[in-house]
Amino acid sequence: MKRKSESKTYVIDLTKIDGDGSFPCPKCGVIISPDDETEEVYVIVDTKVKGEQLEELVIRCNKCGSKIRLTGFLLSTQKA
Ligand SMILES: [Zn+2]
């Protein structure tokens, strides 16, 4: 019986993001960059890997506590 104040998970599709892959947090608007590994803005809470490729990443925004699921890694790394 855990009580969570914030259980909503947002989903960001990286294939729909232009530029370097950074995006604003859907809730608080802080800019999140997947290349940022300082854990100042967000922390990685879960990763899903398919074969050797990253399939999904679940992060938590340090500012507002929202969970954000990042999808689209496979497509973004595929070259036609
Ligand atoms: Zn946020």
Image (cartoon, rainbow, N blue to C red):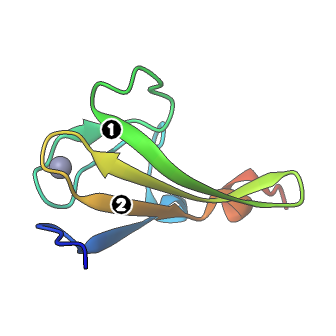
> Left or right of 79: which side holds 77?
left
Q: Can you say which quadrant of the picture contains the N terminus?
A: bottom left
Reading the image, the residue beneath label 2 is 68
x then y, percent, for residue 41: 27, 32
Residue neighbourhood size for the residue with mark 2, other residues' Cα within 10 Å, grouped as few (<14), some (14–19), many (≥20): many
Q: Which mark is residue 72?
A: none
x then y, percent, for residue 56: 60, 61
Reading the image, the residue beneath label 1 is 42
- Whole-Å distance between the Cαs marked 1 and 2? 10 Å
> Left or right of 42: which side holds 8?
left
Q: Which residue is pictured at 31% across the width and 71% down the height?
A: 9
Amino acid type shown at disc 1? Tyr
The residue furthest top is 38
Whether label 1 touches label 2, CB < 8 Å: yes
x then y, percent, for residue 26: 20, 60
* Dot 2 beta carbon under 8 Å from ligand 1: yes
Q: Which residue is pictured at 60% across the width and 64% down the height?
A: 72
Q: Which residue is pictured at 73% across the width and 61% down the height?
A: 74
Regarding mark 2 in the picture, which secondary structure is present there?
strand
The image quarter in which residue 38 lies: top left
Amino acid type shown at disc 2? Ile
x then y, percent, for residue 5: 11, 67
Regarding mark 1 in the picture, which secondary structure is present there?
strand
* Residue 17 or residue 6, whichever sits in front: 6
* Residue 72 or residue 61, whichever sits in front: 61
Residue neighbourhood size for the residue with mark 1, other residues' Cα within 10 Å, grouped as few (<14), some (14–19), many (≥20): many
Q: Which residue is pictured at 33% across the width and 38% down the height?
A: 42
* Residue 1 or residue 12, whichever sits in front: 1
> Left or right of 7: which side holds 71?
right
